[in-house]
Image (cartoon, rainbow, N blue to C red):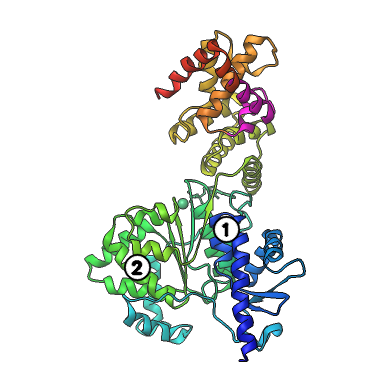
Amino acid sequence: MTNETTEQEKDCYVIWENCLRTIRENTTPEAFMTWFEPITPHSFDGESLVIQVPSHFFYEYLEAHFVNLMRKAIDVAIGAGGKLEYFIAETPPAENNKTADVPYTNLLKQPTNTQNNNTNNNQNQNTNNQTQHYNSFSREMYEHQKAVYATSLNKFYSFDNFIEGDCNRLARSMGFAVADKPGGVTSFNPLMLYGGVGLGKTHLIQAIGNHIIEHSAKKEVVYVSADRFTDLLIDALKNNKGDAFKQFFMQLDVLMIDDVQFLANKEKTQEIFFSIFNNLHLSGKQIIMTSDRPPAELTGMEDRLLTRFKWGVTADLKQPDLETRMAIIHRKLDERQQNLPDNILDYLVHSIDSNVRELEGAINSLTGLSENGIPVTMDVAKQIVEQIVQVTESKQVGIDEVQRAVAEYFAIGVDELKDKTRKKEIVIARQIAMYFAKEFTGFSLKSIGYHFGGRDHSTVIHAIQAVTEMIQEKREIRMYVEDIGKKFKSK
Ligand code: ADP
Ligand code: MG
């Protein structure tokens, strides 16, 4: 290597650092960690900066989502004539024409581990060696254990029927990248998907498993919930089979643990999981987990496990927006070749917004009634929604409740809050009801508008602004709001 290239190598680090500064300022910490930290600068020739990315998927994702930001960063760091090129690390050197003479670097971060060095060394030698894979286990024994330890995947859960929206785009694309190329040279290991109840974690993790089984038939894939993992371990320990349990999980290619938060405060289980995790990770085997909260909030979990969860990537599943909710229920109905009237579907997506499972439950109940000859009217739909939302208490206060309380306070009818009357006292009552709906129900502006006679979300924004101003300017309005507010705050 000449002095010149060494200089240029140094340059590429400086320039990339400069780029990162711009990028960091213009993106979320999560996106920065996921998409920019795994990049290493590769070379710089005075004009083009070559950066090394872990995979083709990664490159495509950056180009699709961050192209303007990258342009800006290059403009700042190099100047307007600056260029950016990618070197994809997963391509073996011989196939990577552009940079064939550049030493190939494996981007998979191999963390140094001080605790399990002996086993890790052994395991590393076995990496990618299928014949050694079962060295101390017969195939038969393996299959037998698999039948006991693994939960079979639900074939119905696929990427195809997992509706994409802003709420899940990152998680879905990361999931797909892992499903397409589990383990190996990717920084998506472990993959941690997190999100609230009923938002599709189990669907997505099982879709990953199904995809791997379908496309990489040789991979040994096991899906198990953290709860079941714990029960199985307790059972194994009771029968003096703790080692066999551990060994079984250590020979997998893909380990999927659902609802990992249930390992909290279970020290022994965490200890065993820790050594399985290390072993798999160091041999480039894929680990996929779901959790109902981000790793940082997993209390009762050992720090050394949490640190390891951060080696890979995390992505969250958020509440789907209105359009995504509608697309999901249409898809579910199509799959079952069922249908419900449009106004009922509209009502459902505006009334159940925080949990797809609840939405599905409502559809199931209503199509069930309809199949038994009971007409699905709006009243029936309302009753069903009330039951579901009440049972799972996902909302502290419902919009109906807000409307009833406000109407009662002003001695008017609930219908008047929804109709087109422009009488001043009704308009004020309506605006106050919208204001409380926003404050207490957690519904989106669109859904609130829907429940007030199909009004636009901008009308709701206007109402909230108007009430906020009136509270400051008019004593009587301030009193109304305080009085009505007490009804909900005492809840
Ligand atoms: P979680 O494990 O997060 O509690 P699930 O994966 O069990 O949630 O999802 C609950 C239900 O909602 C499942 O029937 C699932 O198919 C459905 N669901 C959730 N998100 C989506 C989506 N984006 N597309 C299609 N179905 C979804
Ligand atoms: Mg689940």
Question: Mark 2 falls on what kind of element?
Answer: helix
Element type where label 1 sits in the image: helix
Quick one: 326 or 455, which is closer to the camera? 455
Figure quadrant of residue 279 = bottom left
Q: Residue at x 60, y 72 (%)?
A: 14
Amino acid carrying label 2: it is: Phe
Is 459 in the magenta?
yes
Q: Position of residue 222 (x, y in %)?
A: 45, 67
Task: Name which quarter of the figure residue 271 lies in.
Answer: bottom left
Q: Which residue does the numbered mark 2 point to in the structure image? A: 274
**Which residue is farthest right?**
81
**Which amino acid, by three-letter code, is at mark 1?**
Ala
Question: Looking at this view, is 415 or 82 the one in front?
Answer: 82
Front residue of 463/287: it is 463
Above or below: residue 26 compared with residue 124: above
Residue ID for mark 1: 31
Crowd rating for badge 1 (residues with CA inside 10 Å; few <14, some 14–19, many 20+): some
Q: On screen, 448 above or below 113?
A: above
